[in-house]
Amino acid sequence: MECYLKTLVKQNVKCCQCDGSLADAKHLNIVQTGKLAKWKFPSAGNFLIENCPPEAVAIICDQCVSTGNIKPVYAIESEPGYKTVTYHKIEDLEDEPEWVKKAKEKLSIPSPIMN
């Protein structure tokens, strides 16, 4: 049995890269875009970076993911339930602040203490 939320997404959202259907998707491939989300849902948060603004996300179909070339054209905005979905062109969205990018870089550097 499939999760109800996954069913709603598959019925109401198209791939943010190729505009294809997600109806037959095995996975919901949610991708962070590095762009600011001026909306609440859906967006990605980062609990490791204090006061990190919400990041816009895209949902990509299995076929696009399998190519290994993930470059979403749109980020999505919706209300819980996904009855209405707004697609925002990635190129029109504001980049994350520079301090967020630097904090993410810092987090991705392997720590000699933890490794």
Image (cartoon, rainbow, N blue to C red):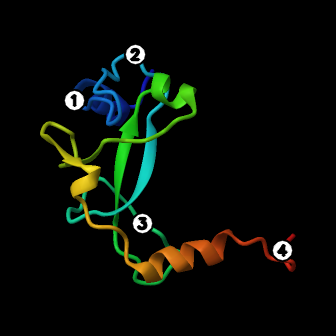
Residue type indicated by callout 2: Asp
Q: Circles 4 and 3: CB distance less than 8 Å?
A: no
Picture quadrant where residue 102 is located? bottom right
Placement of 114 over or under 1, stated as above or below? below
Q: Circles 2 and 3: CB distance less than 8 Å?
A: no
Disc 1: CA contacts within 10 A as few (<14), some (14-19) or many (>=20) = some
Where the N terminus falls, by quadrant? top left
The residue singled out by tag 1 in the image is 12
Q: Which mark is residue 45?
A: 3
Distance between the alpha carbons at the discs numbered 2 and 3: 28 Å
- Mark closest to the chain's N terminus, 4 or 2: 2
Q: Could you say where residue 4 lies in the image, as x and y percent from the top left?
A: 34, 31
The residue singled out by tag 2 in the image is 24
- Mark closest to the chain's N terminus, 2 or 3: 2
Placement of 68 over or under 107, stated as above or below? above
Query: Which of 70 and 38 lies nearest the eye of the viewer?
Result: 70
Identity of the residue drawn at 66% across and 68% down: 108
The residue singled out by tag 4 in the image is 114
Residue type indicated by callout 3: Gly
User: Is label 3 in a helix, a strand or a loop?
Assistant: loop
Residue type indicated by callout 4: Met
